[in-house]
Image: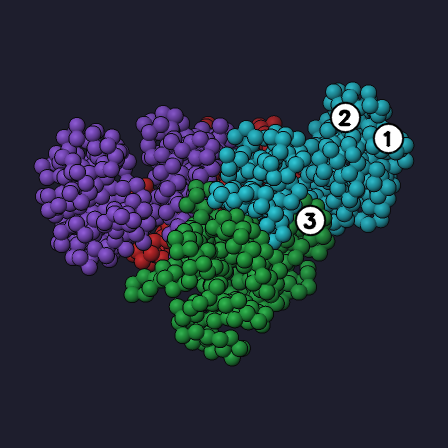
Chain colours: A green, B cyan, C purple, D red
Amino acid sequence: MKIAFIGLGNMGGPMALNLHRAKHTVNSFDVSETAVTRWRNEGLKIAGSAAESVFGAEVVITMLPASQHVDQLFFGGGAAVGLLDSIDAGALVIDCSTIASSTSKKLSEAAAKRNIAVLDAPVSGGTTGAVAATLTFMVGGAVQDLERARPLLEHMGKNIFHAGAAGAGQTAKICNNMLLAILMIGTSEALALGVANGLDPVVLSEIMKRSSGGNWALEKYNPMPGVLDNTPASRAYQGGFGTDLMVKDLSLAQDNATGNHVGTPLGGLARSLYAAHSLNGAGALDFSSIFKMFHK
Amino acid sequence: MKIAFIGLGNMGGPMALNLHRAKHTVNSFDVSETAVTRWRNEGLKIAGSAAESVFGAEVVITMLPASQHVDQLFFGGGAAVGLLDSIDAGALVIDCSTIASSTSKKLSEAAAKRNIAVLDAPVSGGTTGAVAATLTFMVGGAVQDLERARPLLEHMGKNIFHAGAAGAGQTAKICNNMLLAILMIGTSEALALGVANGLDPVVLSEIMKRSSGGNWALEKYNPMPGVLDNTPASRAYQGGFGTDLMVKDLSLAQDNATGNHVGTPLGGLARSLYAAHSLNGAGALDFSSIFKMFHK
Amino acid sequence: MKIAFIGLGNMGGPMALNLHRAKHTVNSFDVSETAVTRWRNEGLKIAGSAAESVFGAEVVITMLPASQHVDQLFFGGGAAVGLLDSIDAGALVIDCSTIASSTSKKLSEAAAKRNIAVLDAPVSGGTTGAVAATLTFMVGGAVQDLERARPLLEHMGKNIFHAGAAGAGQTAKICNNMLLAILMIGTSEALALGVANGLDPVVLSEIMKRSSGGNWALEKYNPMPGVLDNTPASRAYQGGFGTDLMVKDLSLAQDNATGNHVGTPLGGLARSLYAAHSLNGAGALDFSSIFKMFHK
Amino acid sequence: MKIAFIGLGNMGGPMALNLHRAKHTVNSFDVSETAVTRWRNEGLKIAGSAAESVFGAEVVITMLPASQHVDQLFFGGGAAVGLLDSIDAGALVIDCSTIASSTSKKLSEAAAKRNIAVLDAPVSGGTTGAVAATLTFMVGGAVQDLERARPLLEHMGKNIFHAGAAGAGQTAKICNNMLLAILMIGTSEALALGVANGLDPVVLSEIMKRSSGGNWALEKYNPMPGVLDNTPASRAYQGGFGTDLMVKDLSLAQDNATGNHVGTPLGGLARSLYAAHSLNGAGALDFSSIFKMFHK
């Protein structure tokens, strides 16, 4: 398949490479010279511009930092022409960026008028998952478009969920990540409380795991150093999913919640606690380092 | 074995009956005439007083509402003599009440001076678990005392966890239940946010369950009506674990947290939200009804 | 002065009338037929369109519900032409709507290119203040533009604050109102706690007022019925500043906070509590009715 | 008057000295040798024991760190005899400690049986106020007992409030200080949000002070360095009212709130934020340093 891949960051680069290695024709682009050099050296073909990359492409995949970048890329603004004007009718756009669901919907609607299909397909799994092709995709858009995309997504990831119509992939991701942040903080509080009472955190973790306190953060990603091997907590919170990325997802969740008049006391508080944690210097540490707010 | 069982409420009654049916000699007592009549009719032998019930007992089991009842029973106060003076040296006390871990420790220390062993063994599983003998016990105390108790506990429950020394059973329970409340509210927020965006709650629940949002409340006790069968949510929040019981456990957790100087932003907020929910008339509904605070 | 006044709602109508009564030439407009009829009957001159109302106007005043309305009015969209194209160079726009400061800044910048000055001048004081010309204006924009506007603002209000450059009026308002919501909830909690302990709320209010708990909500707008006369609390929370309006302002504050990466644990929680209060049926009650969440 | 004064810490010492300088006969005591030496050097007469200090005293004043110290002093425990047995019938006890209102009530009731009157009279104003005799007293107990105490209190403080019956002084203090913590955090959030938007904090403070955001923390104790002179914020948060003291008062408030089933979402969150702030190393800084959680 002829694929354009725009956005060769720490996530996009490995994803494009996995498609390239699966023998697809990948024409890629990034505005950063550093990124371009790095991935050209890895074997990716680099186009001279975003518009050039999509020339003749059946599928256009984008992986950009935030809503405004997606908006600017596809719709243009100022002197820039929007990429939608360069993509062939009949093509499929798969936007893997984590952005506002309202931006995803707007893109989908504008593209539909040009007979271009769009999926919002934000991922989880981090850079490790991007390299190992074990990402999780949460996909919004039409079922038949997801089926067109599936063979490609399977070269980049392992779990592919259809969340609903346009924008639903974004919504599913922020709901999940908001809940994840709550699980992580709540688990940290419970462990800190137990340890302050003299309990062994390994024993307490095992009890809660087998009781009604069981959750992903406790079982797979325990925030207390030493409870589990191979977690960021057990390597000084290096690697993993950074605090600042969690702040970004929690902010998207809150923007959505205010717009939809949904009360989210724990989700909103999670955002503020992570913002304070970042301000305190932990922005680059794994998000499980929030445990340090409760135990030293 | 000769067992005294004090406290024949909705939990204690069925627990005592299960021991009776297992051919143990159970001498039981409750201050409530109604309770006494009910369980006598079920076949339990009823003593004339708490002191009389423990006469010659090898094991004394108690199931009382709150710290002050346990304190008053064992230590007396005013004109009343404490039960510790009536229990035989060498006997084992198993206190199944959910109370402050400080009270459990105090009881354990005072009893040790009389050569009476004490386990704190609060339960989860509700009245259904008490009747079906499927309770979970979280036990604090010495290992050898737990081994003495185990055959009896196995007539009343299924999972038996040793949490640590005296008081650790109480601590494990409040840590777990504080975390459970956070899971329930967080799951409710995430589902309400998804649904407000048009997502199907069954689809969203499935996605989060298989992602990093997975947790007991989402998977086993989903708070949105219609997502799972056989949950309180799907029968108008009747039955299950009442809001007011959750308020009690969250209050114990907060009392412990303030005493130990542990910050618990989500746990403290959970207490206040459940208190508001109770004030609003939901005290007797299952605790998953907190979902109604976020979605109507 | 020749003034265009666009937006004749419960706030805008009385404001326009006050300018009219001060002998200014006011050409007004609203998209609602009901509003137009009402204010024509009160003596206002009504233009056939927004564009017509600004014809020849030296000052254009707008009072609209939300950011999207201001954006749509001035910039157009779809088939509609933006009002900026119809306003005379040299004119002054005073936007009294409470909207995102980013929208205010965008308007100010676009207008400056056409040599049109813009002030953002959101108000507080409610419909009572609009009628009585006792509103408070928080103004963003250039000092000299505020001086041009001042004589007009003084016909509509009493306190006029210059908060800073474009958008600063909006920011000042959401900071103030976020703080106000926190004062109101915090005061409600303190009073409920005191009363639950048997204290007289009048005595407790007086003590806190004269101590370090003193604040506007406690002193001027006490949320407990019976403590102060002439407050919404003392008339079943009728009138005043509605819960849903507070939700709107708190949502603007949160959107701003997420965009600027500022942690606001109490402000974010205030939004969620007011959202829950509204969902529970209190949207039209005065915002001091949040007291009922803590005391029945 | 013959006065016993027990508890010569940073607060109690200067208070006792002010009574001594007012020509009362003060017989004082403290368990700390350091404290005893210090205040003997300042001129205070020191008794050999607490029991000795109250011999023949008409008024007994106590200023102790926490509930357990008051309980232990008056009721004894272990080998120790309670001080109540040594105080003359007809005497008046004024307990200036900040403790649980339940302990104050228990003391008052036990003392009444011995015809000893008790006032709970916790103070605010800090060590500066203790030295300058400008403390605020919040008093619980009978009116006639307060009138007996008033001449003495006036040698130590400036504002004397009668909050209600026994324990009401304690309740009033924790209600006030819980509200104060909320004012401080809320004010910090509002200022941080404004400053992040480019506003001048002096201007924003002035606007909110004259609007509905006005409160004691903003106006008298502004947490942003440079806004007000002579605040702890303007001397690197040195002096003032320490974070750890605020944690203590917020913990008392939460213990009371859980016991009385009162929801306190902002008050509970304030406790957890201050606990995190203390854990982060700010325990000895003034409590307005919480501002650093929101702005660096």
Q: What residue type is labelled 3?
A: Met
Residue linked to disc 1:
B20
> Where in the figure is residue A257, as x and y percent of width and height?
45, 46
Q: In this view, does B87 lie above or below A275?
A: above
Judging from the image, mark 3 belongs to the subunit labelled A
> Where in the figure is residue B190, as x and y percent of width and height?
54, 46
Q: Which mark is residue B55?
A: none
Q: Which amino acid does label 1 sit on?
A: His
Q: Residues within 10 Å of mark 2 (few under 14, many from 20)?
A: many
Q: Is mark 2 on a helix, strand or loop?
A: loop
Q: What element carries label 1?
A: helix
- Taking A218 as reference, is C233 left or right? left
Residue linked to disc 3:
A208
> Where in the figure is residue B39, as x and y percent of width and height?
80, 24
Q: Is residue C100 above or below residue D154?
A: below
Is residue A164 visible to us here?
yes
